[in-house]
């Protein structure tokens, strides 16, 4: 992001305290770290630039929306957001909007998802470029891969794109989506995010992860949960020069009496390529390695919640 502060050599600050300090600042928060020029350039690229020369310009709306997301309780309301816009405009000698929130809400609804994604990924990449090399693991960048689900308002458009769970009766419950994020371990920045329906063909976490391969660079390490620990996923990442660190899938059994022993509960094993999966084409399949040599080890969790 533009004007991004320099990061300390030690990451000892508590994240929540940093966020609290950041959002306690007066003014429209992100105006100091995300320039109007950058916003306008990205949104123009996506043919989504609006409100040029007006009160609710793309930049003002985006700055205000980002702060609104960070606030809690009444401070997160549209009314409180418009009040902050009024104060911001007054301090800069610019035209002041009325207290009516409808104009702000309509302008906020114009923000393009594609433009927001592009802007976010660019900011994350710039943040990552400022990381202290000492924060990497043996000089390599580790990317955390994790998924979750979330619900959203039950509008017709949301229901059409993200149907609610089949166990729920129509009109009861909310549309639900699945997402998978690629997060920098060094900077905690979301480098990429894939979103899809909760269920259906090619909507699982593995499929969403495969859709983000272009943002994973050779030399990186993908740190994943056991859900993504499969031969095909590891092999596809290996083809891109990306190594994998993951908990072993619960359906795979361990036998430390086999393989090449390195130490107690630490050995090298060999996985054999499984049959062609339904989602993969024949051309891709024949390029997959027939065997993978992997290192498997067992560890004890000393502090609960820390693997």
Image: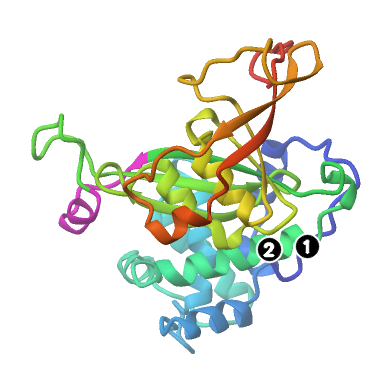
Secondary structure at numbered mark 1: helix
* For residue 252, side relative to residue 165 (left or right): right
Q: Position of residue 212 (x, y in %)?
A: 51, 57
Extreme residue toward the left, this view: 170
Residue at x 49% of width, y 79% of height: 43
Q: Is 166 in front, or is 40? A: 166
Give the side of residue 135 with respect to residue 22, left or right.
right
Do the numbered discs 1 and 2 sit on residues whose CB atoms are within 8 Å? yes
Above or below, 297 relative to 136: above
* Most foreground residue, 200 or 89: 200
Name the quadrant of the C terminus: top right
Q: Which residue is mark 2?
A: 125
Is residue 85 visible in the rendered structure shown here? Answer: no
Q: What whole-number distance in Å separates the C-alpha atoms at marks 1 and 2?
A: 6 Å
The quadrant the N terminus occupies is: bottom right
The magenta stretch is: 150-162
Q: Is residue 250 visible?
A: yes
Residue 68 pos. (x, y %): 49, 54
Q: Which residue is identified by label 1?
A: 129
Against 117, is 74 above or below?
A: above
In front of the other: 264 or 179: 264
**In magenta segment, residue 133:** no
């Amino acid at each position: 992001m533009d004007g991004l502060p320099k990061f300390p050599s030690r990451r000892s600050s508590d994240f929540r305290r940093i966020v609290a300090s950041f959002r306690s600042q007066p003014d429209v928060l992100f105006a100091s770290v995300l320039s109007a020029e950058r916003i306008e350039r990205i949104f123009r690229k996506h043919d989504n630039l609006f409100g040029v020369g007006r009160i609710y310009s793309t930049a003002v709306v985006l700055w205000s929306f980002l702060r609104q997301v960070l606030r809690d309780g009444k401070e997160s309301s549209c009314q409180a957001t418009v009040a902050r816009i009024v104060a911001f405009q007054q301090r800069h000698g610019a035209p002041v909007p009325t207290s009516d929130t409808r104009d702000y809400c309509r302008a906020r609804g114009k923000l393009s998802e594609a433009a927001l994604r592009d802007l976010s990924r660019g900011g994350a990449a710039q943040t990552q470029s400022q990381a202290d090399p000492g924060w990497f693991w043996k000089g390599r960048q580790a990317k955390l891969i994790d998924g979750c689900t979330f619900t959203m308002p039950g509008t017709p458009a949301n229901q059409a794109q993200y149907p609610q769970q089949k166990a729920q009766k129509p009109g009861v419950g909310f549309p639900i989506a699945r997402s998978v994020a690629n997060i920098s371990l060094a900077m905690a920045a979301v480098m990429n995010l894939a979103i899809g329906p909760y269920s259906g063909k090619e909507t699982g976490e593995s499929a969403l992860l495969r859709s983000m391969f272009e943002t994973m660079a050779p030399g990186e390490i993908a740190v994943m949960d056991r859900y993504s620990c499969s031969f095909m996923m590891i092999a596809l990442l290996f083809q891109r020069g990306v190594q994998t660190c993951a908990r072993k899938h619960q359906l795979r059994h361990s036998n430390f009496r086999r393989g090449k022993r390195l130490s107690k509960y630490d050995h090298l094993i060999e996985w054999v390529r499984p049959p062609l999966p339904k989602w993969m084409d024949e051309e891709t399949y024949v390029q997959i390695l027939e065997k993978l040599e992997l290192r498997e080890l067992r560890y004890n969790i000393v502090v609960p919640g820390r693997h």
